[in-house]
Amino acid sequence: MELTDGSRIAVIGGGPAGSFFSYYALEYARRFGLDLELDIFEAKDFTKIGSSGCNHCGGIVSESLVQELAADGLVIPSEIIQRGINTYTMHTEQGKRSIHAPTDEHRIAAVFRGSGPRGCLDKSLKGFDNYLLGLCQEKGAKLIPEKVTLLERTENGVMVGCSKSDMRKYDLVIGAVGLNINALELFKGICPSYSLPEVTRAYISEFIMKPGDIVRSLGSSMHVFLLDLPQITFGALIPKYNYITLVLLGKDIDKDIVQNFINSHQVRSCFPEDFPVKRALPCQCYPYINIKQGNNAYADRVVLIGDSASSKLYKNGIGAAFITAKAAASPAVFEGISKRHFEKYYKPICRDLDSDNWVGKWIFRVTRIIQKSAVLKRGLLYQVGKEQAKEHSTLRMSSALWDTFTGSAGYRNIFRRFLHPGLLFGLIRSTLTSNLSINNRHTHEKQEARQTL
Amino acid sequence: MKSKKLGKLYKDKEIIIKQGEKGSCLYVIQEGMVDVIHETPERETKVAELSESDFFGEMGLFEDDVRSCTVRAAGEVRILTIDKRNFFKSIKRDSSLAYRLLEKMSNRLREANEKINKT
């Protein structure tokens, strides 16, 4: 069972996973001298402002993905990039520290997935999803702006039915439907052993602000918060050109948790003093995120990719879409489209992401312990501060944190680096030094106060 | 709108890589143009002009040797660096990433052959 000249592929979903699959399947086919027909079914119009044109995501294209795309000749145009990020600023109740990119470069792209948040008056904004779809169309993909309502197996293909047009027959069907439960159930019908991913709710909102104010308050730095607040695993403010995106990840984020976070002194201090943070939320959503992979996301002539199959825990969802999309496109073009082919060539990549996420869960458990401990947070800040201030420092902690925050490296790689004896010894020493100096200062202050009395 | 760009900005005539120096990164042009120059004690010869999405420095990925040419900004240019380690890790997972590199290197070899034949 393989693709031949004239074979037809249906890609259901035109987000990054669907687009990356389409782009690479057509590119591999070109290299292979194979003539394919590829249709992308996407009902959303990514040129629309607000929720109807958006796939609900913080909009970070990671350092590793920017590099891989560049190596493949895909330079993200500046009109798509809302801001180039070159530092991360880590906030805790005990203080903040900036971690700089390994080289003096803007290597992370902050983008909008759609064409701007609800209420946005700038009609010239261009989104990342639409840019990727455009690349696929340039390669020869056909966009069908319809919702798929039916998937049905036939003897030698899969029938795809839409709300407005006739059923079409395809040799291969790709599921890139994110975490849309109705669409995933459709795929379960033609892929019976597939089990759906586990999800939780995250929170994303956008604050409109003058570009100058954003530069003054956040700069080109992504601000991450290690605050001792319930249910929040990760909170971040992402500066864009004239918006700031707030992303909260954790367990079942709701309104109260969001307010709790926004009201914290550390978050408030990232905005200009007179900025009405509580009232300035024209666009907000509680999207689902993948916290446990779907299993057996393939069958004969069918494969699910991106969030529908495996993602990267809490980070770099677009990067995971890229990895799974290419991992499915390669066997589909070069090997075959039977269950056996996907099991042999696609499953190991998903399994690798899953086992990396398992380690990631442990990293986030340790992060939770640090979040709750003022003593450890002081130590962490002290160590990062020392590394960043010193020229030619080994930057062990800074680079491990950089990769944790940016999602640039795998969790296993990060975990190994966190276990480096030099890093652990440095953290213990920094924790002792920072906390002893605090105690000494407190004792000194108490003594001074007593003397004044 | 500088904030909306990736990579590092080099000014006109600024040296990005210097012939004879060690280096192991690959560079991808995000915006602008560069001149690739071969230097001898007697003269400088421009061997190529590269523009957006072109890369240079690829020999540094494979050889533990010095840079064979100098690359200089021709006007303002933005360059993104790709680390050798990251690049090879990505290739280990996805070997097709090496395709474009091989394709370009093959093109450059063909162009070099044509130049030699002409002289």
Image (cartoon, rainbow, N blue to C red):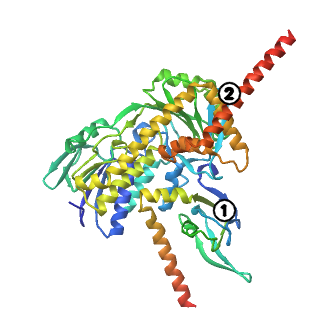
Left or right of A70: which side holds A426? right
Observer-nearest residue: B111 or A440?
A440
Tell me if I can see residue A118 in this picture: no
Q: Which residue is mark 1?
A: B76
Q: Which residue is mark 2?
A: A273
Q: Please, which chain is the residue tagged with disc 2 on?
A: A
Tell me if I can see residue A387 in this picture: yes
Q: CA distance from mark 2 to mark 1?
A: 37 Å
Q: Is residue A246 above or below residue A140?
A: above
Q: Residue at x 15, y 56 (%)?
A: A156
Left or right of A410: which side holds A187? left
Q: Residue at x 38, y 55 (%)?
A: A326
Left or right of A253: which side holds A41? left
Label 2 crowding class (10 Å Cα cut-off): few <14, some 14-19, many 20+?
A: few
| Most distant residue in the right direction | A452
On residue A220, the disc is none
Helix, strand or loop status at disc 1 = loop
Observer-nearest residue: B60 or A96?
B60
Q: Quadrant of residue A31?
A: bottom left
Q: Residue at x 37, y 52 (%)?
A: A325
Q: Please, which chain is the residue tagged with disc 1 on?
A: B
Q: Is residue A124 above or below residue A427?
A: below
Left or right of A110: which side holds B98? left
Q: Position of residue A213 (x, y in %)?
A: 66, 37
Q: Is residue A171 above or below residue A351?
A: below
Q: Position of residue A440 (x, y in %)?
A: 76, 23
Quarter that holds the C terminus of chain B: bottom right
Question: Which amino acid type is marked by label 2?
Answer: Glu
Question: Which amino acid type is marked by label 1?
Answer: Glu
Observer-nearest residue: B11 or A418?
A418
